Image: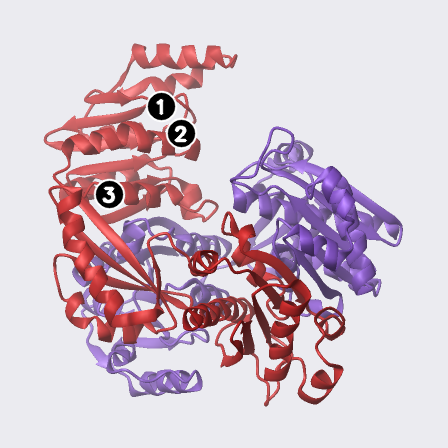
Chain colours: A purple, B red
Amino acid sequence: MTAEIVAVGTELLLGDIVDTNSAELGRVLAEFGVTHLHRQTVGDNWKRLAEALKAALSRSDIVFTIGGLGPTQDDVTRDGIAAALRDQLIHDPTIEDGIRAKLESRRVPWVESQARQAMRPASAETLDNPNGTAPGLICRKDGKVVVALPGPRLEFVPMLRGPVSEYLRSVSDGVIHSRTVKIVGMGESIVEHKLADLMRGEDPTVAPYAKTGEVHVRVTSRAASKEEAEEKVAPVVEQIKSRLGEVVYGYDDDTLESAVLAALRARSETLAVAESCSGGGLGERITSVPGSSDVFLGGVISYSNALKVSMLGVSERTIAEHGAVSEQCAREMAEGVVKKTGADWGVSVTGVAGPDGGTVEKPVGLVYTAVSGPNGTTVDRNVFPGNREAVRERSEKWALLQLRRKVYEGS
Amino acid sequence: MTAEIVAVGTELLLGDIVDTNSAELGRVLAEFGVTHLHRQTVGDNWKRLAEALKAALSRSDIVFTIGGLGPTQDDVTRDGIAAALRDQLIHDPTIEDGIRAKLESRRVPWVESQARQAMRPASAETLDNPNGTAPGLICRKDGKVVVALPGPRLEFVPMLRGPVSEYLRSVSDGVIHSRTVKIVGMGESIVEHKLADLMRGEDPTVAPYAKTGEVHVRVTSRAASKEEAEEKVAPVVEQIKSRLGEVVYGYDDDTLESAVLAALRARSETLAVAESCSGGGLGERITSVPGSSDVFLGGVISYSNALKVSMLGVSERTIAEHGAVSEQCAREMAEGVVKKTGADWGVSVTGVAGPDGGTVEKPVGLVYTAVSGPNGTTVDRNVFPGNREAVRERSEKWALLQLRRKVYEGS
């Protein structure tokens, strides 16, 4: 089975948007063992889209379009698909009813242009889009299939995990099964070195991917049934875990934050944060995990020095003598938030995220993270590479890594 | 003049890499007023690359390839270009000398496979690549041009800013100038309705793009000089601003958070946050703006009810009678953080982000946001659509929108 992606949107060609959706869909196609040899990107022009779709349909079994399903005149994907398939474009009252109901529940008034979203090629069935107004479409005509998906990421990703994966499961021959082993605190080249023999294997395949501050190793096998593939993957995953040890923090959908929360939950312990340069990002990361409220109490965003003193009890002398970006300040922040919140564990972050504010002694990227827990407080010092966003992300991940290490030491 | 990009790399199709290079090149093409209607992505296969190049050359004046210039067997771009142009592939001793010199200076030994990088189509001239071994290529044959650029970002971006921009300047006729008007708090279809006549215009063009919780409208013109294009764009931008009013929060690189910070900075006022369901995300968003520390003091992540009481002074009775997700609680959180931090403005967020915790009375997506400032406190109630991530993102944007509204009312 072969598939091809046609991404639609002038903003993609102009470079206003980086096309992460096509990459996500590419990963899902690979998971289902669907061969995927071409991708095209066209602007908001139905004729060029129709030409691109015809080229794609001439060489692929399934063509996915991404984007162009909105209500505006620029949203031409429905028109392009109908033209390429020589299909009629019809108004579907059921789609319109669904859109009206969604808008009503959000108290958004109906505008006549919305009716555009209720049009579909006659051959199309709809794919449910719980996070947006326009449904996806799956059009089957003359042995060819075109699947139309919405462009906004918050609509696209859930549809990919839901109805699109379901559809691919139903049509793909055999299954690809893969598990991802997630590693933090060990570089890619060391991971590769330790797994060199496994990486030479052909079934399952073992491949490392470097992420910001993490390494993910994907173990993949293809077989007639899921069970058969799992039997080949499981022992290799075990091997990797036993070779790498505690730097393996989880698998598949686990995140560093969900792994840390699970470890604390198992011990019935609670957590609070004290954030300076991360500005709330560590709390945001922790609370991105559903159900985090049984472990995470909250904390303080002590962005100004005054709040470090008044809300966390950092001593004025510490700030005067060592500055806010210092081992001492990080320590007092973590200990202070434990005292103020009554949490078992306190984690703090203070650093120079840049682009300004760096000095020779305290360069951009210098970050202190501290963990205060039942066995005392430890402070780590790092100088992280990258821009403001990267420094903040690495700081948050490091703080979680450090917390995880302390929690395991304490157990 | 028309151009087209052919991105080369199996890792792009598999989704292991997101194609930021094509987006960067797209932006540069737009800057130089080069029309850019198609993009293709193919894997590391010279036959499919040659087919893609032929299709591209049949409709575009210049074709850019990105990637596939390295020394390995997977690097087939040179072969694909030669095939598409019916050109010979020759060994260029000057290129080889250059590569040898670069390797020597980095003390990397010469390996015979490196010789692959010294091959080029006979019609090619080289483009200097100061950050890598293989040079870029510019091949001119039968009135067509193919420009080959390396894929690694650290090589690609400097070449884009250097020799590629120089080349485009020499061949492009005129420039494209565009400005983006950024809107929050008004849906895409209403924006479109209000700008319908402008959107039918051809010079400048006016096109809306929906983002999560925002709409961006781009106004674009093409002219012989930048000044001439600006003269056409500016009055239309003014028109849009005057028709849409205060929902226009900024232009171009402005973000909602940078616009709010700028407004507060101009008034020498300070800001603090009190976050429940957003868990720190509002603070993270505000502090993503460099230099936010002169306005933003910090705040409290009051994820647990106990912290709402102990750190923000929310009354226990409010929580017992109305719950933490209530108008009263949002109000007391915002007023409490003003009192505790001494900020001029306090913003609070409390809601049900889901996926669990929803009830008939308080469904998933129900969020109260409050703004407390010099003229009192207002609370907004929304039921946001989407998953946990979407509800949180929309809550944060709404809180900023509400703050912005209050700041302007107060002025």
Name the residue carrying label 1.
B129
Q: What chain does mark 3 sit on?
A: B
Q: Amino acid at mark 2?
A: Glu
Residue B385: image location, x then y, percent: 48, 76
**Viewer-side residue, A67 vs B393:** B393
**Residue A37 visible to an observer of this rendering:** yes
Residue under the image location 49 percent in, 51 percent down: B289
C-alpha span from label 1 to label 2: 7 Å
Q: Looking at the figure, which quarter contains the N terminus of chain B?
A: top left
Q: Amino acid at mark 1?
A: Asn
Name the residue carrying label 3.
B31
Q: Is residue B150 left or right of residue B126?
A: right
Residue under the image location 58 percent in, 50 percent down: A221
Q: Are marks 2 and 3 on the same chain?
A: yes
Residue B276: image location, x then y, percent: 64, 70
Q: Earlier in the sequence, mark 1 or mark 3?
A: 3
- The label on residue A166 is none
Tell me where residue A93 sits by quadrant: bottom left
**Viewer-side residue, B62 vs A196:** B62
**Viewer-side residue, A13 vs B370:** B370
Name the residue carrying label 2.
B155
Q: Nearer the viewer, mark 2 or mark 3?
A: 3
Q: Is residue A388 left or right of residue B170?
A: right
